[in-house]
Image (cartoon, helix red, strand yellow):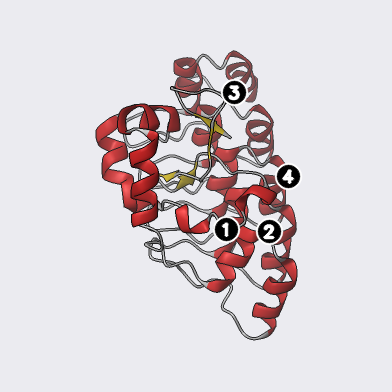
Amino acid sequence: MIKTDDDPKAPLLFPLVCYGFESAVPPKENRQGLRSAEISRECLSHECRRIDSQRVGRVDVIVKRIGRGLLLGVALALSGCDANTPLMDRVIDEDKQAVEKLIAEGADVDERNNYGWTALMHAGRIGSLEFTELLLDHGADVNAQDETGRTALLKASFAGHTDVVSELLARGANVNLTDEMGRSALHWSVTRGRQEVVKLLLAHGADYTLKTTDGWTARMLAMKEGETEILALLTQAGAKE
């Protein structure tokens, strides 16, 4: 749960998606009925960039600058802007019976919402191994990219869902695909301090020499973020810059 600055014990009861990543996913039992309050990336992307271009996706910054009440109001006003498919909605709800029924009825597992997301990307984002496997078993494109270039692997790596990352890699996910910022799954996992994900990605051939559009390698990002253990992993793997 996200805590607000004015009341550290009060959770912010909706997921905030900024730059294509959900910064917080409430437990399943608390997600029911909250889909109408989800904010898709484009809904607030310009505001997110304006608020703090250096701290991508930091919910505490966004809440502090905008205010919890106003942000919730904007979320409600913009509900539905992502145009998620029924299959996506049921994946988010983790309703296996409904997902299987929709697929049996011919639902396209790779259908996109307004921002290029697929159901598999949502499964990666929320960290559902069960639904990741289910969608892949029914032919979901493991390397599909949304309109920012992000894949299910990038979303799962960002969020630190190690088991989902492992499954996606085992199913052929391209470990070195990058988004529009030139960031790979390795860049994002380093930035977010996801040590176990970093280990997995390196073991599957992640290219630590790749540079983002603004010139950052994974090792540079580890140094910038003070991730000493991850820095040691990268150095041990052979990263020098």
* Mark 4: few/some/many CA within 10 Å (<14, 14-19, 20+): some
**Residue 4 percent across, percent down from the top left:** 47, 27
* Closer mark to the observer between disc 1 and disc 4: 1
Callout 2 secondary element: helix
- Residue 97 horizontal/vertical position (percent): 75, 72
Picture coordinates of residue 226 (x, y %)? Answer: 51, 14
Q: Amino acid at mark 3?
A: Leu
Label 3 secondary element: helix
Marks 2/4 in contact by CB < 8 Å: the verdict is no
Cα–Cα span, label 3 and label 4: 21 Å
Label drawn at residue 234 = 3
Judged left or right of residue 68, residue 11 is right
**Whole-Å distance between the Cαs marked 3 and 1?**
42 Å
Residue 163, which numbered label?
4
**Viewer-nearest of labels 3 and 1?**
1
Residue name at image x 31 percent, y 28 percent: 65
What kind of residue is marked 2?
Thr
Disc nearer the start of the sequence (3/2):
2
Looking at the image, residue 171 lies above or below residue 22: below
**Helix, strand or loop under label 1:** loop
The residue positioned 65% from the left and 57% from the top of the image is 172
Three-letter amino acid code at the position of disc 4: Asp
Q: Secondary structure at mark 4?
A: helix
- Residue marked by disc 1: 33
Disc 1 residue crowd, few under 14, some 14–19, many 20+, Cα 10 Å: few
Whether residue 65 is situated above or below residue 104 in the rendered picture: above
Query: Residue 96's image quarter?
Result: bottom right
Q: Which sits earlier in the primary sequence, circle 1 or circle 4?
A: 1
Q: Tell me which label, 3 or 4, sits earlier in the chain.
A: 4
